[in-house]
Amino acid sequence: MDAWKDGGLMRAEDVGKVITARGPVEPEQLGAVMMHEHLHSDWAQKAETPFDMAKWPILETYGVWALRELKKHGCHAFVDMTRAPERAAPWVYQKVSELAGFHLICATGFYREIKLGDYWAREPEDQIWPFVRESSVEELEEYCVREVEEGRYGTDLRAGVLKLGASSAELTEAEDKAARAVARAHKRTGVFINTHVQGKGAQKAQLDLLESEGVDPARVVLGHTMGHLVNEWPVTQACMTRGAAFALTNLRMDGPEAQRRAWADGIKRAFDEGLGDRVTLGLDWVFSVGYTELAANPAWRPHQGGSALLVPCTFMPPPPFVYLFTHTIPRFKEMGITEEMLNTMLVENPKRILPVKRP
Ligand SMILES: [Zn+2]
């Protein structure tokens, strides 16, 4: 708070605007917003190396196509939650955004620490970006602030969202450090916080930590929380009542009917209890390198190099991103989710949460 008062680094001209890959825009321009997607996530990238052009065709064709399709559904923006080192080079976001005429809100920040042996974490260096372990809270804070205020690596691609993650209710040392850095960067930049929540109780743990650092819960979206909405309603409800929003993701419709219904009922319950203004939607859809390799060969691990191409992810069905509008939403409507609720979750809530706001 003092940074604002004392003329800190904050760029006052951003207030009320959403920072996108092509610069700050008025929130009214966004229409419906998907709150948690990934244009590009490459687990073979150990560091942010120059973009491998072998990966460009899929983004230029399917990626741009998908974003143009989204616009037909009134969706003109998504929050791209990929952080270093898996994200693409800055120009990729700007070029795709420009070709599609679609807004991308790009993240800075950090992912959760993965348990050794899970997913692709075969060695300690795979568990979390080594930069997080090696840096102090202050260094991580400076990194985030710089990406918001100046742009990524000397380019004009500025971050418009701060990311953090937690694997469980007990934050690891690295997760705790990253979360504090994000909280402090938020207080200096006014950019909203969007999280990845994994295990039970991690939503509350994140919110507790952020609040202890002086963050207003209304500036926080606890994401990847479709299960938390359904299975941990009392905890989730309490976080919503404190002011935090939730982002439900991975809403695939080809699974069990009971699961689809539980998601729809969970959303309706939130609205029934007057908490509809705390719910947002996304898919966590990804063009990736890594998932396919891992599925085919459990011994595969990223950071081995290689020439794997970017492919549509294996954990969300096609079509990319627009699946939310072509598959999820029609089924949700059959299960009683109204147009009014959809407008609240997709348009009104992001319009309130995304713009830069003085802490
Ligand atoms: Zn994600």
Image: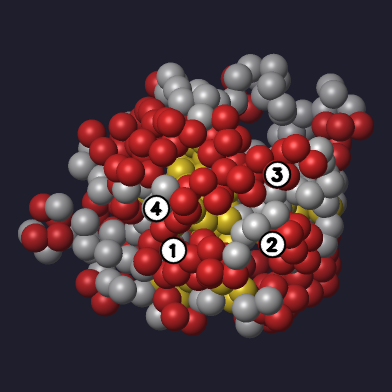
Dot placed on the residue nearer the N-terminal end, 4 or 3 = 3
What residue does disc 2 label?
333
Q: Nearer the viewer, mark 4 or mark 1?
A: 4
Name which residue lies at 76% across and 70% down: 66
Q: Secondary structure at mark 1?
A: helix
Q: Which mark is drawn over residue 261?
A: 3
In this view, 105 is above or below 217: below
What residue does disc 4 label?
274
Dot placed on the residue nearer the N-terminal end, 4 or 2 = 4
Q: x, y (%) of residue 334?
A: 73, 59
In this view, 333 is above or below 317: below
Amino acid at pointer 4: Gly
Name which residue lies at 26% across and 45% down: 215
Q: Nearer the viewer, residue 46 or 327?
A: 327
- Distance from the alpha carbon under mark 4 to that under mark 1: 14 Å
Amino acid at pointer 2: Lys
- Distance from the alpha carbon under mark 1 to that under mark 3: 23 Å
Mark 2 and mark 3 in contact? Answer it, CB < 8 Å.
no
Dot placed on the residue nearer the N-terminal end, 2 or 3 = 3
- Distance from the alpha carbon under mark 2 to that under mark 1: 19 Å
Q: Nearer the viewer, residue 181 or 156?
A: 181
Q: Secondary structure at mark 2?
A: helix
Residue neighbourhood size for the residue with mark 2, other residues' Cα within 10 Å, grouped as few (<14), some (14–19), many (≥20)? some
Residue neighbourhood size for the residue with mark 4, other residues' Cα within 10 Å, grouped as few (<14), some (14–19), many (≥20)? few
- Distance from the alpha carbon under mark 4 to that under mark 2: 19 Å
Q: x, y (%) of residue 49?
A: 64, 51
